[in-house]
Amino acid sequence: MIIKQIWTGNAYRNFNYLIACPETGEAMAIDPLDHEKCLDAAKARGWQITQVLNTHEHFDHIGGNEKVIAATGAKLLAHANAGDAIPGMDRGLKAGDWVKVGNTVELEVLDTPGHTMSHVCLLSHTETPALFCGDTLFNAGAGNCHHGGHPEELYGTFAGQLAQLADNTRIYPGHDYLVNNLEFTLNREPDNEQARDLLGDVRDQDPNAALISTLAMEKEINTFFRLHSPTVIARLREAFPDLPEQPDPGMVFLKLRELRNSW
Ligand SMILES: [Zn+2]
Ligand SMILES: [Zn+2]
């Protein structure tokens, strides 16, 4: 499996992806908003885009579909319940389905509600697993729930699915929000040395060669995985004095998500 991360350079800081089979040159484009960059990247490598996959229905993820499909004849895949919101869907996906690209690439479909209620993530079962997580999980952060999502469902996805993946899973999110998210982590957990060190390393990074984190790293630097941290809980109590002595992790997650909304 060959993964090409494409930095759009737009105001929303989207990442698009091409996933290719090295044997056949067939490729799938994930959320190819910047259709020109995606088509050019495929052409430069001799790849044929045969599928377009949308992680969810927001415009900054589906906005390039038409142009890519017009140029390639690719089939359009998305969550089975996203059909009303995503024009021209050819295949509706549900949890446990597999998406194949060429001879060698197989990706498991995860049904990951929260950011929206019809959001999928894709997981490769390769030696080093790869997770394409749209706007559910970001580097050092979590998706918001402002446009069709629910924080309780997002917590369920984090705790029940994402946190259970292998520690060496590489994380490929739909946006580059790493610096801003690390600053939020440090606002919530000022003694998080790993987040502080990483922020120093990536503050001026070129998004064309962005850091690819792992789940193990996220568990250290992403406040939405640090629900048992005494510092996180103590700082949360400053904002929410009624917080119980030992808040359950779901409550911590929801309060963090609430603070992040206005941070
Ligand atoms: Zn979104
Ligand atoms: Zn987005």
Image (cartoon, helix red, strand yellow):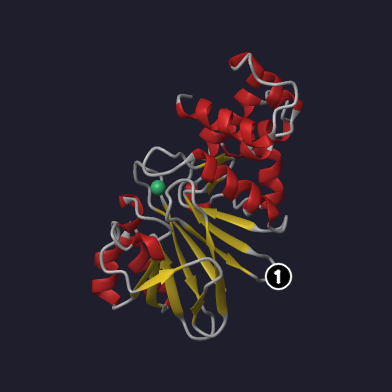
- Element marked by disc 1: loop
Q: Position of residue 232 (x, y in %)?
A: 68, 26
Query: In the rendering, at what x and y percent does residue 212 appear?
Result: 60, 53
Q: Identify the image quadrant of residue 164.
A: bottom right
Above/below status of 164 relative to 26: above
Residue 31 image-quadrant placement: bottom left
Q: Is residue 226 left or right of residue 116?
A: right
Residue ID at (61%, 47%)? 158
Residue at position x 39%, y 74% in the image: 51
Q: Is residue 207 above or below residue 118?
A: above
Query: Where in the figure is residue 148, as x and y percent of width and height?
Result: 38, 44
Relative side of 246 to 44, left or right: right
Q: How many marks?
A: 1
Query: Can you tell which quarter of the image residue 17 is in?
Result: bottom left
Asked if residue 19 shows in the view, the reply is yes
Q: Is mark 1 within 8 Å of ligand 2?
A: no
The three-letter code of the residue at mark 1 reads Glu
* Between 2 and 28, the one nearer to me in the picture: 28
Q: Please state which of residues 200 and 196 is positioned toward the viewer in this rendering.
A: 196
The residue sitting at 51% across, 48% down in the picture is 136
* In this rendering, position of residue 40 left or right of residue 99: left
Q: Position of residue 93 (x, y in %)?
A: 44, 68
Residue 224 versus residue 8: which sits nearer the camera?
Answer: 224
* One can see residue 53 in this view: no
- Neighbourhood count class around disc 1 (C-alpha, 10 Å): few under 14, some 14–19, many 20 upward: few
Image quarter where the N terminus lies is: bottom right
Q: Residue at x 63, y 27 (%)?
A: 186
Q: Where 159 falls versus 180 (above or below)?
A: below
Which residue does the numbered mark 1 point to in the structure image? 127
